[in-house]
Image (cartoon, coloured by chain):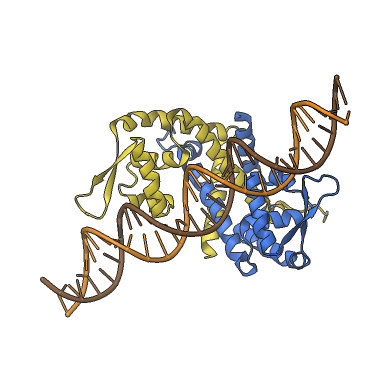
Chain colours: A yellow, B blue, C orange, D brown
Amino acid sequence: MSTSRKNTIDTLSTGELGFLVSAVRSSIWDSIEAELKPLDISPAQFVVFNSIALGKGRTIGEFCRLLGYDSGAMTRLLDRMEKKGLIRRVANPEDRRSYLIELSDESRAMFPQARRRVEAVFRRLLGGFSNVQAEAFKRSLEQVLANAASMR
Amino acid sequence: MSTSRKNTIDTLSTGELGFLVSAVRSSIWDSIEAELKPLDISPAQFVVFNSIALGKGRTIGEFCRLLGYDSGAMTRLLDRMEKKGLIRRVANPEDRRSYLIELSDESRAMFPQARRRVEAVFRRLLGGFSNVQAEAFKRSLEQVLANAASMR
DNA sequence: TGACAGAATCTGCCTAGGCAGATATAGTCT
DNA sequence: AGACTATATCTGCCTAGGCAGATTCTGTCA
């Protein structure tokens, strides 16, 4: 007993966890980018696109809060999407300071395809995971998030 | 049996995995940033600092490859560290195109403290993990990476 | 030696996001 | 209504990283 081999928590604590998580994040991002390239949609744009299409948020401020974006960044992200014709800003009758964000007819028609592509990417990224492993993975990620939140 | 509840793989595939991983990455980053603020070192700078101090890489190009950085970005990251006195560029006698990167005496003396702080952050982020859970978590991250690599 | 492909670093340019401040509108309280 | 605070969005400025091209040096091969 009592070998010199470090346990996994020690290993991950040297910075390996940060490295792994960063690498996973950019792998996910790159995979989605490649998959959506034919549709001319960036990963960031898809996240908003998805949110709008699913009715999760209607105004710019809501998307900022839901997606953890700065309001200036969101303004410009939507500018780019609007220029491409993916979305439009519509006056909000309930609050003249804000806009309601709507999909264009074309982008609404395109959404299912984009969505299927993204789901396919995640399924491939989760290849080899049993449902039990996926559940444990999800809980681990949530646990780290909760620990970080409690540090603040 | 056969309820309408989706399994975890389905849930994660809707984009939840990307969201979680991004959130975890920025939580880690923010925690390290806060912890190293008193030492005036950014998370990105620490990653290089750590690499140099542990002898993992000696030239700019090696750090680029090890850390997945663009060479222009690394040049400027090192510029900032050099301006702060953390590192210096020394002529490489074996290859006059490149520099050897060395820690200054002050930063070498400061390294253990920075390192301890970062390790403490990761230990807190992994609070509540058994070693077995940590091992499974690490393997899941590596599995996703491997899956992404095999898609290219 | 001379030509030349390849590598190491740096620089300029571009994109994207964060932050701070500006503007317009809402909501509240008197 | 008037004053005041809060909120929604936008704009300007800054930082940081990616990419492409320039420069300098290395290694190879004729």
Q: Residue at x 51, y 35 (%)?
A: A32
Q: Give the side of residue B125 with respect to residue A94, left or right.
A: right
The location of residue A46, given as percent across then percent down, is 42, 38
Q: Nearer the viewer, residue B114 or B89?
A: B89
Q: Residue at x 77, y 44 (%)?
A: B97
The location of residue B47, given as percent across then percent down, is 67, 54
Q: Nearer the viewer, residue A125 or C24?
A: C24
Q: Give the side of residue A49 with respect to residue A147, left or right.
A: left
Residue B65, image quadrant: top right
Q: Is residue A62 visible?
A: yes
Dividing the image into 4 quarters, which one contains the N terminus of chain A? bottom right
Q: Residue at x 39, y 39 (%)?
A: A50
The location of residue B35, given as percent across then percent down, is 61, 65
| As drawn, A139 above or below B11 | below
Q: Give the side of residue A7 with respect to residue B3, left or right.
A: right
The location of residue A44, given as percent across then percent down, is 45, 42
